[in-house]
Image (cartoon, rainbow, N blue to C red):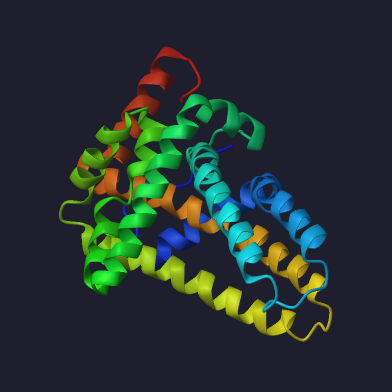
Amino acid sequence: MESIALRPRKPTEIVDAAIEVYRRNPVHFMLLTTMVHAPWLILQLIVLGNAPPTAEIATQGLIGLGTVVSYFLMSAVVVQMASDLYLGHETDAFEAFRRVGWKLPATFVVSFIQGFLIVFGFVLLVVPAAYWSALYFAAIPVIVLERKGLFESFGRSSQLSKGLKLHILSTLGLVFIIRIAVTLGATFVVTVVPNFAAQRVLSALVSIIVYPIAGISDALIYYDARIRREGFDIEMMAVSAEAGRVGVPSV
């Protein structure tokens, strides 16, 4: 498998590359998000059955919280798998899990801190939320791909974001808009279905399909920042050239 061209990309180009990465192994990306949704969907169907969305608000809130926590854990695995495919390595969901391994707890804590800062930023005003999103955009990729520690990841992300915050924020915003547009469109279609249990299943299916784009984009924005700030593309070309000279496969 060949790597996708390593070069600086505009926000729209990063999204295009993310979709290309997704297409390299869509089944296993969706398998990862199914592992997030399936347990909570089954619990919803058992506990809530065909109850309307306005019923059992507390229970639905707890199930929603559990889904978010699961996403926090799964985002690291999606980043690892996206990175491998982007760089031209064969991989799957199980290999990505194995490679992330003991870094899962640290990525969960980072995801929680990021989520808290963004929510708190929105409470203050939108500007702090946007700034913190751009500042700490790479915290999870740094832990997963550079094997840095919890606190090191925030410092490293801050370093990579220097001079690129508007670019990073534009890309994150574009991904967010795409996800919201797809979700709203799907929600409109789902509400036509008269059965509330069926609505929950269809909503989960849409999330399973759409969610990987966010994690894949996180990995590609990280690499884009490294290309712009550190010449990562040149570094990889040098590695490939050296590997070719000694007659071994490039990495």
**Which quarter of the figure has residue 152?**
top left
Above or below: residue 241 compared with residue 71: above
Q: Which of 82 and 245 is in front in this view?
A: 82
Residue 174 to residue 1: above or below: below
Front residue (pair 171, 232) = 171
Furthest residue toward left: 163
- Residue occupying the far top of the picture: 246
Residue 64 spot, x, y in % from top left:
59, 60
Using the rendered image of the protein, determine whether residue 180 is visible from the camera's viewpoint.
yes
Name the one closer to the observer, 197 or 34. Answer: 197
Position of 158 relative to 149 (above/below): below
Q: Residue at x 36, y 20 (%)?
A: 242
Q: In this view, does 140 lie to the left or right of 121?
A: right
Q: Where is residue 171 in the image (x, y as percent from the top left)?
A: 36, 64
Lateral position of residue 161 relative to residue 120, left or right: left
Say which residue appears at 41% left-offset and 67% top-offset.
Answer: 12
> Which residue is drawn at the image coordinates 81% and 70% (left, top)?
197
Q: In which quarter of the image is residue 144?
A: top left
Residue occupying image coordinates x 64% and y 37%: 93
Taking the image as shown, residue 93 lies to the left or right of residue 46, namely left
Q: Can residue 10 be seen in this view?
A: no
Q: Quadrant of the N terminus?
A: top right
Give the tally of numbered discs: 0
Expressed as whole percent of the image width and height from the top left, the position of residue 21 reads 55, 50
Residue 19: quarter of image: bottom right
